[in-house]
Amino acid sequence: MTLNHNQLLTRIRSIHAAIRDAVVAACEQTALEQLSAAVGDDAGDTIFAIDRVSEETLLHHFAELADTWPLVLIAEGLGTSGVVVLPAGTSEEAALLRVIVDPIDGTRGLMYQKRPAWILTGVALNHGPQTNLSDIEIAVMTEIPLVKQHLCDSFWAIAGHGTQGERFNRLTGATQILIPQPSRATTIAQGFGMIARFFPGGRDILAAVDDAVIERVLGPQPPGRALAFEDQYISTGGQLYELLMGHDRWIADLRPLLDRVLAKRGRALGLCCHPYDLATELVAREAGIVVCDAHNGRLSAPLDVTTDMAWIGYANPAIRDLVAPALATSLREAGLLE
């Protein structure tokens, strides 16, 4: 079967719109206490009531999509394996595609109406369980807005064809072209950038590394001034968006590197970023953002919901050349990188 990238992209975008609308409707009609109730602990993360809304819509629409393109669907909320083959009864080997999805990336912020969440989808040809994040050919990310928010954005990319975007007005139904604008700055001074440290456990280590990077790049902290800023957006899709829109100059999520240091403290490694969180890193790369692993190599991971991943995003090559050496040195000093 020939893969029509544009036709498939259009279908994926329509699925995203359906999920977005269903989740926003649930947020408008359901009490916060109900949406924020923990209802399960499937592969990858805790499942909240709000997640069930997106999962039902996800399965319904991808089952329809699979009538045209048989697929292996990989997502949170699909049981302990995080995998289902569609149409039902199809063997995994017979599927044309492997599709990895995070139906709501940023659940915690959305269910408390603190910050928008994101629907993330990456599509690759099915090469079996060894299919890699680097095999993704189509990626779509769509904002799930807050109830009080009338504009919501989406970006998408086909490998080798750049990144496109759209801004949707929920009140009028109007859309407008949205062009990604990663920062062209060549310094991190007076800009936003950070090392992710969302959850308890090792935050002191990550904060110390962050401070060391800033001092290496910008020098000692002068009295009464701020050299740079940070924004802890608890959503990988949201972090990619901040890079795409020129809001952030660099982001590093290095939580898996804490494993050995925490073990010495008698502590376990907590929640980390997983491949489904990075299903749309293609969108950022196609927009010119430098996305890499902790060793500055191409991101590589199986398409699953369990592999712990460290990643770094730089708005442009100049920022990478400025920050990467300081980050590597600071990580080695902290015992996080060999």
Image (cartoon, helix red, strand yellow):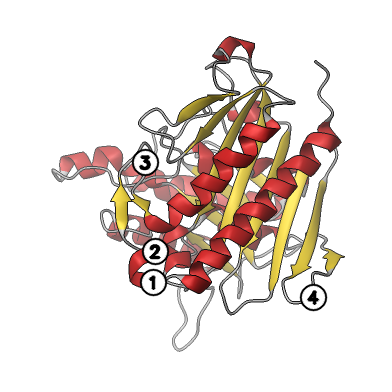
Q: Which mark is residue 35?
A: 2
* C-alpha gap between disc 2 and disc 4: 27 Å
Residue 300: quadrant of the picture: top right
Depth check, mark 3 against mark 4: the one in front is 4
Which callout, 3 or 2, points at the residue further toward the start of the chain? 2
Residue 126 placed where, x, y %? 64, 18
- Is 182 left or right of 177, judged from the image as shown? left
- On residue 257, which mark appears? 3
Q: Residue at x 44, y 52 (%)?
A: 51
Crowdedness near tag 4: few (<14), some (14–19) or many (≥20) residues, C-alpha within 10 Å: few
Residue 176 image point, x, y percent: 85, 66
Quadrant (top left, top right, bottom left, bottom right) of the C terminus: top left
**Crowdedness of circle 3 by 10 Å Cα count: few (<14), some, many (20+)?**
many
Q: Foreground: 149 or 70? A: 70
Which residue is rendered at x = 50% and y = 45% of the image? 55
Three-letter amino acid code at the position of disc 3 = Leu
- Amino acid carrying label 4: it is Thr
* Amino acid type at image mark 2: Leu
| Residue positioned 48% across, 66% down in the render | 110
Residue 145 in the image: above or below residue 97:
below
Q: Is residue 284 visible?
A: no
Q: Residues within 10 Å of mark 1 (few under 14, many from 20)?
A: some
- Quadrant including the N terminus: top right
The CA distance from mark 4 to mark 1 is: 27 Å
**Would you say the residues marked 2 and 1 are in contact, meaning their CB atoms lie under 8 Å apart?**
yes
Badge 1 marks a residue whose secondary structure is helix
C-alpha gap between disc 3 and disc 1: 34 Å
